[in-house]
Image: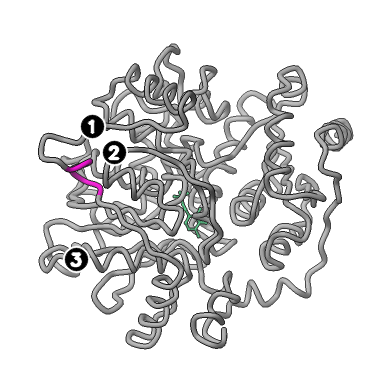
Amino acid sequence: MNYISARGGIAPVPFGNAVLTGIADNGGLFLPDSIPDATGRLAEWRSLPYADLACEIIGLYADTPAVALRGIVERSYSTFRDPDITRVVSVGPVFVLELFHGPTLAFKDLAMQFLGNLFEHLLGKSGASLNILAATSGDTGSAAIHGLRGRDGVRVFVLHPRGRISKTQERQMTTVLDDNVFNAAVEGTFDDCQRMVKELFSDTPFKRAHALGAVNSINWARVLAQIVYYFYAAFRVMDCTDAPAVRFAVPTGNFGNILAGYLAARMGLPIDRLVLATNDNDVLARFFADGAYRPAPVVSTPSPSMDIQVAGNFERYLYYRFGEDPAAVSRFMDEMARNGTASVAPLPDGRMDDLIAAGSADSDATLAIMREYHKRYRYLADPHTAVGLAVATRHMDEAIPMICLATAHPAKFGETIRQALGDDAAARHPIIDRLGSLAARCDVLPASVAALREYVAARVAEA
Ligand SMILES: *Cc1c(COP(=O)(O)O)cnc(C)c1O
């Protein structure tokens, strides 16, 4: 299988190229040239353990030899604390799919552990090295560091705004002491960090000379790894309910997680609805209401990993929404660049999509549902998961089970738990409790691209 750009205009490239380059030269996002139909495989996949299922699904999209892929998958998921990797639990009226049993207690581990092992494999083949550069406001940075720590051929540089992320998030990154991990606390804001990274990436000679790479949520391998748990969870829930299909509720920021569900449905998994849930940064919920994509200024909410107004992976959805017409995607993206907004016509039945339904939950609704689930069902959801739970309640169906994706462990958000419940006694995790006593390493950088250039160049030269 080869990879094309959602905006067209490039010759198809093999899987490894799409993963290592991250983004096509014309700025478009990579997509498989076709989506495999798995309808005929569902019965045989249904009883597979997580790692076996991952090999089957990923194997349809990747040209990685089966033995190598098996090794990558096994190494990636051996770092998870749950033998099932992702766990489905029945909670009141819904099922909760817990995606937070990886090293950083957030769903990004499912993709980032896989990406780290995949990079190592792809680089090992060519003997090349790669220097990953990322700016983070919290979760992505720590998942990337834990996915890439100790990997041959890879260094990872993560910039965070000094003193502006939570102590937990900071320590989850800076207590990783592997030689190939470099944390830089920037004396500025998250926007400064992002600007510095972007500017260095746009310096093409520097980028080439220092083999800079990215691990952001638009990397195809991340989406691919996420498809697996939709199948795995649907099978578990269909096993115990005998239902013919399931629904998923997905707390959404960059459209990465829900895109994987969308692809699972297109592969033939019986998903009768995907419920897209946003916080007050509701650009996607508004799109699915009236077809206009109109980003607004970002506001802070109790679910910070979803405080996003430009959803990186949305372009991939548009490709399918426009009937796999890259020219239409290109026109939409051009119009966005020109006018800051663009729109899509509704389907003949007036809906915006026949699979996705969307809604948003504000901060009060988020905290209220956290209290309700804790009080009635003794289940403590983190604030991101809670956004999904709140929107899910508006899309329930007697005959079809609802699976709500739990994207982080509540212990990562003690402050919000205290706000919702009065104390955070129920939100503890030994990994988080231990962070305070570990040694840490971090450099401080002024908010200037010149300083970043020097920092990266010096460390790459050391090897
Ligand atoms: C990143 C993140 C999300 C949003 O996922 P997207 O793929 O960006 O839609 C939701 N919850 C948590 C805890 C996250 O870290």
Quadrant holding the N terminus: top left
Relative to 301, is 121 above or below?
Answer: above
Q: What residue type is labelled 3?
A: Met
Which is in the foreground here, disc 3 or disc 2? 2
- Residue 291 is tagged as 2
Could you tell me how many numbered marks the image carries? 3
Could you tell me residue 210's position as x and y percent? 76, 26
Image quadrant where residue 354 sits: top left
Relative to 297, is 304 above or below?
Answer: below
Q: What element carries label 1?
A: loop
Q: Are marks 3 and 1 in contact (CB under 8 Å)?
A: no
Which is in the foreground here, disc 3 or disc 1? 1
Q: What stretch is highlighted in magenta?
A: 351-356
Camera-side residue: 75 or 291?
291
Q: What element carries label 2?
A: loop
| Residue located beneath label 3 in the image | 396
Q: Upstream in the sequence, badge 2 or badge 1?
A: 2
- Residue 345 is tagged as 1
Q: Is mark 3 on a helix, strand or loop?
A: loop
Q: Are marks 2 and 1 in contact (CB under 8 Å)?
A: yes
Q: Upstream in the sequence, badge 3 or badge 2?
A: 2
- Residue 72 is tagged as none
Image quadrant where residue 12 sits: top left
Whether residue 243 is in magenta: the answer is: no
Camera-side residue: 369 or 235?
369
Q: Does the residue labelled 3 lie within 8 Å of ligand 1?
A: no
Q: What residue type is labelled 2?
A: Gly
Q: Can residue 139 be seen from the camera position used here? A: yes
Quadrant holding the C terminus: top right
Count residues near mark 3 (Cα–Cα under 10 Å), then give few for <14, some for 14-19, many for 20+: some
Residue at image point 42% right, 31% down: 62
